[in-house]
Image (cartoon, helix red, strand yellow):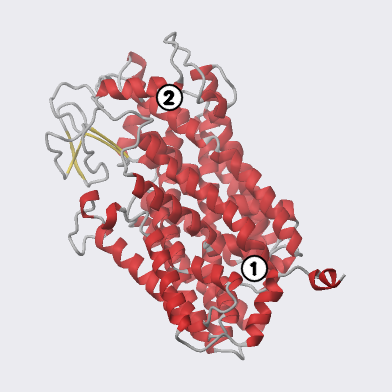
């Protein structure tokens, strides 16, 4: 059976499974739609949380960025994993005890203000749509390569699948679908990692393989070989940083606190029966997440070694069987995810240092004298001949290593599962914030349960359409787009949630001013350097304090805290009933009677 047919069958079977689960667990009430009825088992919730958390950025893009950034890529590992621990220990149990459906629900009740609720909804939508752009982009990349369709068509197919199980099933359908998706994605990620680790080092454990010797007789470990190879080619050593320490710190902090402010992850802890179940499910989720995150550095290193060895110095006109440029290179070139320009007209692919040109630029429809696709942008002399979209490395890894077709098909299903699981969670929080927080709790309080459920599904349809547009026109690589979403969460929702739990004197005026100022600052900074509207040069010498747009959320968070505390100091005090509510959230049941004895 051909690899292409295996891929169609595997991906098709996974779609049938997801949609079948959604139909079986279709939401029949708003409680089912928002929090899966509040009766999800901690282990199932842990798997669903892990799937919700491990998005296309984790599955597809993170190892690719690590493969090319080396040491600098460690910020994603440290920030995202550390942030999940922060969320699980510091916020999740208290939010579950509060017992509402959404994050804006908590902020609206805690800060006794409809305005605070609306501001929280605006923050949530800004975060979620930025985040979902990366997920839909990941869906398009996977479909484009494995199903031989354009990226735009891949995004549209992904939208259709998400529509069925997110709009029909709500949180109940999404939860049990995500359990299946976790099983698919983790098996799809670990299987090729084990194979490739065996091929390169002889060690079947990828995490250990990263520190093992390469099976080429050199006596070098994987990282030592990468350093030596990259230095020979003129690159910076793989294990040395190129970013400034302050930027590494700022990005890590923004990713960490942004994680703790992500609404689609927080809402997962509202689906379990008890507060203790929230803690237990957080522990299970951390174990499930660790399986992938401890493997990603090895996958990135193996991918970079294999890419260099198979591509650099290969003759483009020759077939792979004759020792020429491998087929995966030409396949990704055809869909615009690899670009090559033969600058010296020798017909040999030369991979060396230099700023990469835009490999996703429009294809002219013509081929160069060496057979390469000619693009509308013409790289200058200081450009590298090869440009690689970082999002392809995990997908291409099995092909580069010449693994069996069933492994390649499995990776396709895993990549799609990772992207769709997070996209569905994000779409749900967007739709629930519109139907529950804006309509039911703010503008239309007399709306019936049935009408609210209908509005939630309608909002999900609209959100899917916007998400599809953003997936077709993303502002960067998947992980980079997601990093911007974490910065927005860090600068807006995280401080409001943290102060709402641990600072009972924080009032509504302070919380609103903090969220607005933090979000406006971060959005403005990101737009200035990431959009084409202002013509700003996105380089370190132009950044404030040397902090990149990916890390600016940490400064936005500080601004949020400072503004909130300052405003709260000079405005009316928090009502006594709200202060009592905060005490009730933080103090375990029975603590008072225990103190009396």
Q: Position of residue 94 (x, y in %)?
A: 66, 67
Q: Residues within 10 Å of mark 2 (few under 14, many from 20)?
A: many
In the displayed structure image, the side of residue 83 where residue 99 appears, left or right: right
Question: Is residue 452 shown above or below 387?
Answer: below
Q: Quadrant of residue 384?
A: top left
State the image coordinates of residue 419 (x, y, percent, origin top left): 50, 51
Q: Residue at x 52, y 37 (%)?
A: 411
Q: Could you tell me residue 43's position as x and y percent?
A: 73, 51
Residue at the spot x=59%, y=58% of the render?
A: 87
For disc 1, the marked residue is 95
Q: Position of residue 199 (x, y in %)?
A: 51, 18
- Residue, far right: 597
Q: Is residue 109 visible?
A: yes
Residue 218: quadrant of the picture: top left
Toward the viewer: 432 or 80? 80
Circle number at residue 223: 2
Residue 209, placed above or below residue 299: above
- Label 2 residue SS: helix
* Mark 2 or mark 1: whose residue is earlier in sequence: 1
Left or right placement of residue 172 versus residue 350 in this view: right
């Amino acid at each position: 059976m051909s690899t292409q047919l295996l891929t169609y069958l595997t991906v098709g079977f996974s779609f049938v499974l997801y949609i079948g689960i959604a139909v079986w667990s279709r939401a029949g009430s708003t409680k089912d739609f928002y929090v899966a009825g509040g009766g999800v088992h901690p282990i199932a919730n842990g798997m669903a949380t892990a799937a919700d958390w491990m998005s296309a950025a984790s599955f597809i893009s993170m190892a690719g960025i690590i493969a090319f950034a080396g040491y600098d890529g460690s910020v994603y590992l440290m920030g995202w994993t550390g942030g999940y621990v922060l969320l699980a220990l510091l916020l999740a149990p208290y939010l579950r005890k509060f017992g509402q459906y959404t994050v804006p629900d908590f902020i609206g009740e805690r800060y006794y203000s409809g305005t605070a609720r609306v501001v929280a909804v605006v923050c949530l939508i800004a975060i979620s749509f930025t985040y979902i752009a990366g997920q839909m982009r990941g869906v398009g990349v996977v479909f484009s390569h494995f199903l031989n369709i354009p990226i735009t068509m891949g995004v549209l197919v992904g939208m259709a699948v998400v529509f069925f199980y997110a709009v029909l099933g709500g949180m109940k359908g999404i939860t049990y679908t995500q359990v299946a998706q976790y099983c698919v994605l983790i098996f799809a990620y670990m299987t090729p990692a084990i194979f490739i680790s065996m091929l390169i080092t002889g060690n079947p454990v990828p995490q250990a393989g990263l520190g093992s010797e390469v099976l080429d007789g050199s006596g070098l470990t994987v990282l030592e070989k990468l350093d030596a190879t990259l230095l020979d080619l003129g690159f910076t050593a793989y294990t040395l940083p190129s970013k400034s320490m302050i930027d590494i710190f700022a990005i890590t902090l923004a990713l960490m606190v942004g994680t703790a402010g992500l609404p689609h992850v927080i809402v997962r802890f509202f689906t379990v029966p008890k507060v203790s179940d929230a803690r237990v499910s957080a522990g299970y989720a951390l174990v499930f997440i660790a399986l992938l995150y401890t493997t990603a550095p090895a996958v990135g290193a193996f991918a970079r070694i294999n890419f260099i060895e198979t591509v650099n110095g290969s003759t483009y006109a020759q077939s792979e069987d004759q020792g020429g440029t491998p087929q995966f290179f030409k396949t990704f070139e055809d869909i615009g995810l690899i670009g090559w320009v033969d600058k010296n007209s020798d017909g040999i692919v030369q991979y060396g240092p230099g700023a990469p040109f835009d490999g996703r630029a429009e294809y002219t429809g013509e081929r160069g004298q060496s057979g390469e696709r000619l693009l509308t942008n013409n790289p200058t002399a200081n450009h590298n001949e090869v440009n690689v979209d970082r999002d392809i490395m995990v997908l291409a890894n099995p092909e580069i290593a010449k693994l069996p077709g069933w492994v390649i098909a499995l990776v396709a299903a895993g990549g799609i599962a990772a992207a769709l699981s997070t996209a569905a969670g994000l779409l749900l929080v967007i739709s629930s914030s519109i139907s529950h927080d804006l309509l039911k709790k703010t503008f239309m309080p007399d709306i019936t349960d049935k009408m609210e459920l209908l509005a939630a599904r309608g909002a999900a349809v609209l959100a899917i359409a916007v998400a599809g547009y953003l997936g077709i026109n993303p502002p960067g690589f998947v992980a980079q787009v997601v990093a911007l979403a974490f910065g927005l969460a860090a600068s807006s929702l995280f401080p409001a949630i943290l102060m709402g739990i641990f600072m009972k004197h924080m009032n509504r005026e302070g919380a609103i001013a903090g969220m607005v100022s933090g979000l406006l600052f971060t959005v403005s900074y990101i737009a200035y350097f990431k959009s084409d509207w202002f013509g700003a040069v996105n380089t370190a010498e132009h950044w404030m304090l040397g902090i990149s747009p990916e890390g600016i959320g940490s400064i936005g968070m500080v601004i949020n805290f400072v503004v909130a505390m300052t405003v709260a100091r000079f405005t009316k005090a928090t009502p006594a009933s709200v202060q009592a509510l905060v005490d009730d959230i933080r103090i375990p049941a029975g603590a008072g009677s225990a103190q009396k004895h």
